[in-house]
Image: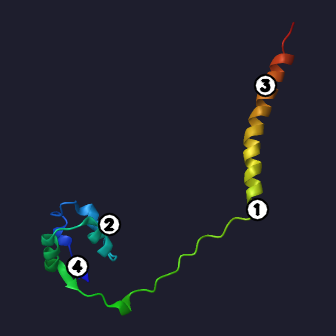
Amino acid sequence: MVYDITPFLDDHPGGDEVLVTATAKDATDDFEDVGHSDSAREMMSKYFVGEVDSSTLPAKVQYKPPKATSAAGQGTGNLIKILQFVIPLLILGLAFALKQFGKKD
């Protein structure tokens, strides 16, 4: 079933955002989960437009998760993490060495 609830957006007790997030999809579960009153269900008839022609619905696409990254890619990530730790230590050590050897007695 298709409903045009545009005229009801400003009057909806839950605000228009709730209705807008349920547009262009089957909002049956959204409607039922809220637990609407009998008067709300009766009000729906005023906004009824028609039935959905199921032959015009696009086919559902099966979700395919992305492929896992290769082990070679993980090695590069580990190398970067190690360098991010080692390079500051080397700079700190170099600064300390310059300070110690640069002192004049």
Q: Earlier in the sequence, mark 3 or mark 2?
A: 2
- For badge 1, the amino acid type reads Ala
60 or 10, which lies in front? 60
Pointer 3 residue: 95
| Disc 3 versus disc 2: nearer the observer | 2
Q: Earlier in the sequence, mark 3 or mark 1?
A: 1
Q: Are marks 3 and 1 in contact (CB under 8 Å)?
A: no
The Cα–Cα distance between marks 1 and 4, rounded to whole angstroms, is 51 Å
**Label 2: which secondary element:** loop
Residue 60 percent across, percent down from the top left = 46, 83
Residue 51 percent across, percent down from the top left = 26, 88
| Picture quadrant where residue 10 is located | bottom left
The Cα–Cα distance between marks 2 and 1, rounded to whole angstroms, is 41 Å
Residue 43 percent across, percent down from the top left = 13, 74
Q: Earlier in the sequence, mark 1 or mark 4?
A: 4
Pointer 1 residue: 71
Check residue 21 in the rendering and tell me which mark sits there, or answer none.
Answer: 2
Q: Are marks 3 and 4 in contact (CB under 8 Å)?
A: no
Q: Residue at x 27, y 61 (%)?
A: 17
The Cα–Cα distance between marks 3 and 1, rounded to whole angstroms, is 37 Å
The Cα–Cα distance between marks 3 and 4, rounded to whole angstroms, is 72 Å
- The crowding category of the residue bearing disc 2, from other C-alpha atoms within 10 Å (few below 14, some 14 to 19, many at least 20), is few
| Disc 3 versus disc 1: nearer the observer | 1
